[in-house]
Image (tube, rainbow, N blue to C red):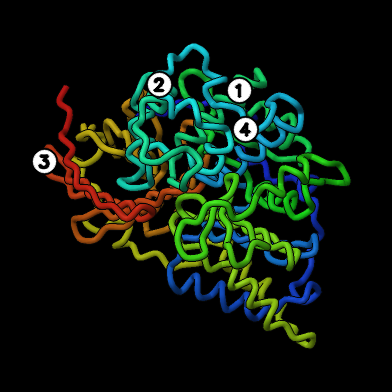
Amino acid sequence: MKYYYIFFCIFSIITKGYGQKNIPWKVSSPEEQGMSSLTLINGIQKLKQDNTNIHSLLVIRNDHIVLDACFYPFQKNYVHDIASVTKSITSLLIGIAIDKGFIKNEDEQVITYFPEYTVKNDTLKNIRIKHLLNMASGWQCSWNDREKELQQMQENPDWVEFMFALSFSSEPGEKFSYCSGNFYLLAEILQRATKMKCHEFARKYLFDLLQFSNTYWEENDIGVNFGWGDFIASPYDLAKIGCLLLNDGKWNGKQIISNEWLKKIKPLYYIHGTESYGYGWWLDSENPDEIQALGRGGQRLFILREKNLVIAVTGGGLNSGDIDNLVLESIKSYHKDETHNAELKNLIKTIESPGIKSIDRKSIDGNGFSASMLNKTFHLEKNDLEWNTIRFEKRNKEYYLVLDFTDGSKEQHPIGMGNKYKISKEHVFGLPIAIKSFWDKNKLIMDYNRLCKINLYKFSFVFYENSVDFDFQDLTNKRNVLLKGIAVTK
């Protein structure tokens, strides 16, 4: 798969924290907002005990932050890829574009915005913007096989042409079928209607008004942002979107998006059980008071109107669907005489810090890197990581992983030995990557944690004279791949 990127706000997110002026909420103890700190403590401890790969948990009730926890090595000044939560934001952007008159309404034909394409299929003519928003376009497209249609679309030189050529499994508007390509078309429509890129439009009419910090959004080679995903923002900014919905589209007294549009977000297409979908958001048909946005790897935004509650979760592979139950239980179990807030604060400090561990020299040196392993470039088989070659070097007292990517870009990362993370930056947006390793006899075990870009990999390297066996587990997506690297001879 090819990746195309655009840079916005080229300030370093590592050295520049999320400014206090960007956080609009006061901080409160859970008890002051009718919630039990003890229940939250027990829930967080359970997440840690289960080795849940959660990155951040932010809870806002009654316009107060009652829980703001980051799980090391993720840190509060980091942004995060929110994956398919992006779809819900794209839906809001379409609503704003309609409010502003850039788009007439969601009943417009999709093909109206693509006059250069010859349409021979009459069914295609029946697809409306609202069908894209509701994942009800009717195309033969689903979340099976890791969204193979999305992968195929990205490999095609013309993404619109690919989508228009898909077969139909149902009539437009008839039923729900998950299809990220729908939201790519929405991004194209938004750009064609407004003469602005989605990210530019979003910043002007939404993000800047909510005082977002740095944001990033991947785009393709013709400059269209990925309307279905790959939007990167702070967890605080994600929570702002939730509060915007909670307040009927108003922010600081100003109407940012019409309440008329937000009222369209309701259970329209039933998926299974009580799970439903409507206008880019996930709902429960038996509890329409709760709205959710979901993304791969555990990214989730909960809005619970009745409880005046917003929950923002980011992670690297977790089932975040029960987080709302934990928070609701903290409301249910609240006792006015409870005084556990100090314990909660101490627990948060603990999970945010790397901790103090004694370092076993064997885990650092162990069998160690021999001279034959270092400063040798290994060419890898084709892989999903898009790594072309890997190389290990020792510089002063530190070891480094040196990567060449298939697109010609490079990265160099210090390796935290003794199973302690070292944090460096990836080459695209300068986002943090955390790496820790230890030796297990002749095998180098490494956690390669992309943090802000979701994926957590566990690598193991076994070195031979002129090759390396490279076994990687994608812990986020539950995959395992064995590769071989061959030493490059000069």
Give how far across and how far down residue 432 sits, in percent.
51, 43
**Vertical comparison of 350 with 202: above or below:** below
Q: Circle 4 — which element? A: loop
Residue at 68% in and 45% down: 17
**Label placed on residue 191:** 1
| Horizontal side, residue 486 vs residue 413: left or right | left
Q: CA distance from mark 4 to mark 2?
A: 22 Å
Q: Quadrant of the C terminus?
A: top left
Q: CA distance from mark 2 to mark 3?
A: 49 Å
Residue at 38% in and 59% down: 419
Residue at 81% in and 46% down: 250
Check disc 4 and give the amino acid type: Asp
Give how far across and how far down residue 144 sits, in percent.
33, 47
Q: Quadrant of the N terminus?
A: top left
Q: Circle 3 — which element? A: loop
Q: Circle 1 — which element? A: helix
Q: Nearer the viewer, residue 251 or 404?
A: 251
Tell me whether circle 2 and circle 3 mark residues in contact (CB < 8 Å). no
Q: Which residue is mark 2?
A: 161
Residue at 60% in and 19% down: 192
Check disc 1 and give the amino acid type: Gln
**Vertical comparison of 275 with 295: above or below:** below
Q: Nearer the viewer, residue 387 or 332?
A: 332
| Horizontal side, residue 205 vs residue 322: left or right | right
**Label placed on residue 107:** 4
